[in-house]
Image (spheres, grey):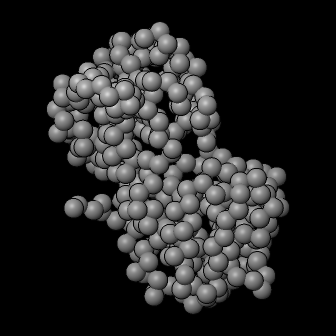
């Protein structure tokens, strides 16, 4: 089975552990003087919440031989208290705001177990000389895992997974009538790591592929996936391309610009029966507009790994609607991706312990006292 190229990760994975500095060693004179010590205790990596338990477990395993580093976790509502004694924070879905960071006197690094940092006040972290980092999806198994989940959700919607389950319960044979990916038009919104893994997985199904992105086309890093597209559009082409799509897959980042991207206006421009799949961020979908479109019989189905409010209310309309297929934010949660990312967290924790900046720095931190 083909594994993703590790590229920049090669020097970070657990195999490189033997080459790491001795506990507490400095890479240069005064290299860790910009950060206060956490005291006589062990260097602490805090997982901010009990969601995504395998991230914590695999990181704990990856750092098991580092006697001076401990990996702990707390409930999301307890993060403000526990953050005060943490050297590295892995936020997951927790909010790390300016008030919380002001009390985090030992904190050296905020490292997301994945890409999204919507809940982190990066400006406040920078002001307090706290590095902010994430783990790019490409090359870790995260992007390809999310791409596989997108394929799963597309097929589940096209083949009416909920109606099939109802047929089993009701001992009904030969129903429902499904649709195929073969011959369908699929529009991918965004063209980052997930999209670039998704396109080559969809191509063998015999569907027509289009994509829109905000940055310019022609990036050498995505040339292979770009070559498989039947149409490439700019961000302004979204509505035009959505009008001819049978399936729309959301794989873009969530920002103020893209929040509620799929709303009443865009859905109205789509043809009847369109399916929307979201493996990115829940806020990209206007859920009220989607519900109205589903109830009107215009929107054909939703396949959602992410929702605006998580965890989702099991008694809410999304969880009970026959045309909605839900998964519990697990698109990127595979053993391949989570063990790989745990190795990255372990390596970055060692770097932070030794006074080094993260391998991927999303802010600029002054190291002068």
Q: With 263 as the anchor, is 355 left or right in this view? A: right
- Picture quarter with the N terminus: bottom left
Residue 275 location (% of width, % of height) = 37, 24
Residue 287 location (% of width, % of height) = 56, 24
Residue 6 location (% of width, % of height) = 34, 65
- Picture quarter with the C terminus: bottom right
Q: Nearer the viewer, residue 217 or 298?
A: 298
State whether residue 210 is above or below residue 289.
Answer: below
Quadrant of res 348: bottom right
Residue 28 location (% of width, % of height) = 61, 85
Q: Nearer the viewer, residue 218 or 318?
A: 318
**Residue at position x 47%, y 41% in the image:** 327
Spot the residue most to the front. Answer: 171
State whether residue 80 is above or below residue 173.
Answer: below
**Residue at position x 59%, y 70% in the image:** 357
Quadrant of res 282: top right
Q: With 89 as the anchor, is 99 left or right in this view? A: right
**Residue at position x 35%, y 16% in the image:** 273
Q: With 116 as the anchor, is 36 left or right in this view? A: right
Query: Would residue 131 be visible to someone looking at this image?
Result: no
Q: Nearer the viewer, residue 254 or 333?
A: 333
Query: Would residue 320 be visible to someone looking at this image?
Result: yes
Q: Count every numbered label the image shows and give the total.
A: 0
**Residue at position x 66%, y 57% in the image:** 49
Q: Nearer the viewer, residue 83 or 157?
A: 157
State whether residue 178 is above or below residue 265.
Answer: below
């Amino acid at each position: 089975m083909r594994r993703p190229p590790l590229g920049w990760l090669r020097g970070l994975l657990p195999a490189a552990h033997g080459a790491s500095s001795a506990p507490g060693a400095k890479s240069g004179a005064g290299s860790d003087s910009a950060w206060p010590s956490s005291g006589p205790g062990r260097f602490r990596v805090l997982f901010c919440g009990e969601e995504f338990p395998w991230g914590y477990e695999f990181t704990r395993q990856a750092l098991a031989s580092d006697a001076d580093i401990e990996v702990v976790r707390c409930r999301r509502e307890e993060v403000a208290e526990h953050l005060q004694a943490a050297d590295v924070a892995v936020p997951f879905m927790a909010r790390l705001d300016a008030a919380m960071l002001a009390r985090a006197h030992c904190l050296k690094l905020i490292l997301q177990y994945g890409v999204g940092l919507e809940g982190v006040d990066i400006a406040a972290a920078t002001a307090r000389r706290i590095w902010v980092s994430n783990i790019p999806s490409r090359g870790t198994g995260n992007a390809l895992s999310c791409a596989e989940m997108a394929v799963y959700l597309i097929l589940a919607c096209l083949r009416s997974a909920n109606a099939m389950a109802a047929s089993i319960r009701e001992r009904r044979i030969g129903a429902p009538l499904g649709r195929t990916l073969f011959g369908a038009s699929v529009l991918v919104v965004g063209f980052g790591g997930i999209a670039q893994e998704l396109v080559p997985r969809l191509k063998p199904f015999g569907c027509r592929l289009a994509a829109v992105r905000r940055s310019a086309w022609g990036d050498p890093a995505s040339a292979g996936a770009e070559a498989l597209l039947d149409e490439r559009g700019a961000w302004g082409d979204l509505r035009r391309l959505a009008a001819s799509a049978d399936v729309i897959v959301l794989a873009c980042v969530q920002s103020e610009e893209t929040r509620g991207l799929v709303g009443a206006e865009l859905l109205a421009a789509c043809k009847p029966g369109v399916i929307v799949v979201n493996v990115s961020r829940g806020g990209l979908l206007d859920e009220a507009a989607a519900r109205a479109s589903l109830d009107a019989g215009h929107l054909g189905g939703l396949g959602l790994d992410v929702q605006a409010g998580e965890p989702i209310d099991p008694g809410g309309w999304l969880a009970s609607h026959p045309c909605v297929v839900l998964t519990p934010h697990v698109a990127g949660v595979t053993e391949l991706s989570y063990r790989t990312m745990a190795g990255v967290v372990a390596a970055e924790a060692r770097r932070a312990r030794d006074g080094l900046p993260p391998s991927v720095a999303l802010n600029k931190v002054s190291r002068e006292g």
